Amino acid sequence: MKVIKQNISETLETNYMPYAMSVIVSRALPEIDGFKPSHRKLLYTMYKMGLLKQTRTKSANIVGQTMKLNPHGDAAIYETMVRLTRGYDALNTPLVDSKGNFGKVYSRDMAYAAARYTEARLATICETLFSDIEEDSVDFVDNYDGKMREPLLLPSRFPNILVNANQGIAVGMASNICGFNLGEVCDGAIGFLREGESFDILKYIKAPDFSTGGELLYNQAEMKHILKTGKGSFKVRATYRIMKAENCIEIAEIPYTTTIEAIIDKIEDLVKSGKIREINDVRDETDLNGLKLTIDLKRGASAEVLINKLFHMTPLQDTFSCNFNVLIDGHPAVLGVEDILKEWCRFRKNCIIRKYKFNINKMEERYHLLLGLDAILVDIDKAIMLIRNSEKDALVIPGLMEAFSITQLQAEFIAEIKLKHLNKQHILKIVNEMKDLEKQIKKMTGIINSEQKLKKVIIDDLVDIKKKYDVPRKTQLIAASEEITVQSHHLKPDYRIKIFLTKDQYFKKISIASLRSFGEHKLKENDVIIFNEETNNKIEVLMFSNKARLYKVKMYDLEDMKASQLGVYLPNLLGLGEDERIIYVYPNVDYNAMVLVGFQNGRVAKLPLSLYITKVNRKKLVNAYYTKSPCVGIVILKETEIACAIRDDGKKVFFKQDDIEVVQKRDAQGQKVMTVTKKYGMNKLIAVEQKG
């Protein structure tokens, strides 16, 4: 087999580039009329079927007729049609008036019915798409087999490209255009035409609008950047209401970018993994009245905290990434809203000019014929005698042309006039028609040659369209500052745990549920548990070391252990220094307790835990207590406990917490509680149950 070497750049350009350009130009990206080719072919087919004003027909019939223009198969055509329907609810301004089950954009599993069951026709707003199409306002090309003609663009009288959302993935590029409110877009286009260079887009178009509603977290600077450049992102979240009587949350609208099934799946995953514990049940109660997702809460759970957890952990709050990539004259370009309006106005002006030129040509042809008729009105009897005395039919036309100095077209028109029309009334009617034609030709020529008059035609159209088809905004704007910033600990699950510290510095966090079924603790040889206490997962544990350092550890940052595991090794977790070890741990709630620190010199310092509060989230504090005498024990007394200081010779001193004065410096050595000698120093400070 002979191997032929080829330059890879030339091969890609020859073989791959035509495919890539075909996908970009002829399939994936929308053009300035707001449509991809598949949309345009479908709508034009429905228009030619007379479905703009007639009753609905079966969708299968529409799909079959569309295949004359679109050869990609009935399934792809029907799927395209579904997205354009009122029933599917994907567009702010639906273009297909549908009857039957077309599914819903907010549901992944709600499948649309087969084409043989559903019916459709064009929505009334499609009048604005096709009203000029028969007047040469746009170019037509042959279809794929050359037997039909189809428009390259539709002469849309409003900026459909901005009103209805559009998404496409081409080769090496993509497009993601969000929808805007029809009334706002019309106002924006009118403002652009009137104001020119001083046009401010934010004055007319505040933000996108979605058919599924929801709440948009509005940041003016970010939105201005998106409207100016066509790139950027913003957040949309669901709308909800808290039903206190039923102890549940009802979701009524969700972000355009997600589905109700995706939300339910994510919530169920969070519940199963234990990351959310406030939910009893989640149900899809969507019916003919619209979307409804119900979340049942456990008794005592806070609905406000839960909904904000869900916003941060599920698609109930999602991000829409904008990429306004549009085909302009066959070339892809990422444009801001202002630039898209500019291109649409240029396109619309060209449509109007072509339409008026087409009508002027028709009128001039008619006027030319009437001029010939006007020429013979001077001597009708002469014309009648000429026709009557002609020996052959072929001599009538030349005879009229010679006798009245008219053209062949005029002579043919005169020769075809019925004898009954040669009366005074008809002659006056023709004279008046000529005057009307002169006025209309002059008016249309004036519009074509005047930029201001062209703008007025477009503005009048937009005003009329807004008046007829405008609907209230569905997506409400909420200032980004109103977004509740949920701290990380709010998103962590809270449940009862038990913590353990061993002599060899192993630490375990075990859930109470797991403890109920555990066996013996696994420990290293000769290791013993020196501390254990029941607490909550959201607690912060304070760990005091023998080197006068304090470490703060949030329990939700540690993985749950099992009794059969050794636990986490604290020197590795905390980065303890050489010969440093943790001697006391305390599950802290609010820094309101008092800590007693005993020293070998017989003194005890009573320190408020509030001395360990820091403004920043520091995890390690040095000089946590007095360092000039070795620490022999740290305790935080419970209400039923007293402190016990023990000397090397076994002597004990018992005292209450109130017997010690509070110090306000962490490095204070405190109050003397026991007499020590060179031979016997204090070697332990412990807490014991108070008797009696």
Image (cartoon, rainbow, N blue to C red):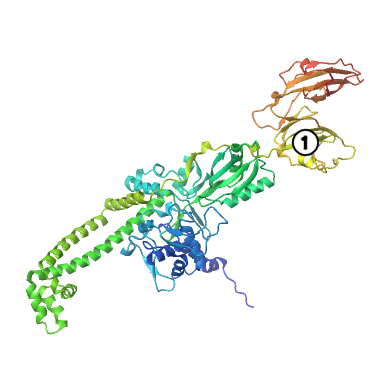
Going by the picture, which residue comes out furthest to the bottom? Answer: 391
Inspect the image, locate mark 1, and give the three-letter code of the amino acid beneath it: Lys
Quarter of the picture containing the C terminus is top right
Q: Position of residue 193 (x, y in %)?
A: 33, 48
Residue 486 visible somewhere in the drawing: no
Vertical comparison of 282 with 528: above or below: below
Disc 1 crowd, CA 10 A, few/some/many (<14, 14-19, 20+): some
Vertical comparison of 82 with 220: above or below: below
Q: Position of residue 152 (x, y in %)?
A: 40, 64
Query: In the rendered view, does 469 fall on the left or right side of 280?
Result: left
| Residue 296 location, quadrant | top right
Q: Position of residue 322 (x, y in %)?
A: 50, 50
Query: In the rendered view, does 38 fall on the left or right side of 530?
Result: left
Q: Position of residue 521 (x, y in %)?
A: 85, 40
Residue picked out by circle 1: 498
- 431, 138: nearer the viewer: 431
Query: In the rendered view, does 32 fall on the left or right side of 286?
Result: left
| Residue 487 location, quadrant | top right
Residue 281 visible somewhere in the drawing: yes
Numbered marks: total? 1
Going by the picture, which residue comes out furthest to the front? Answer: 245
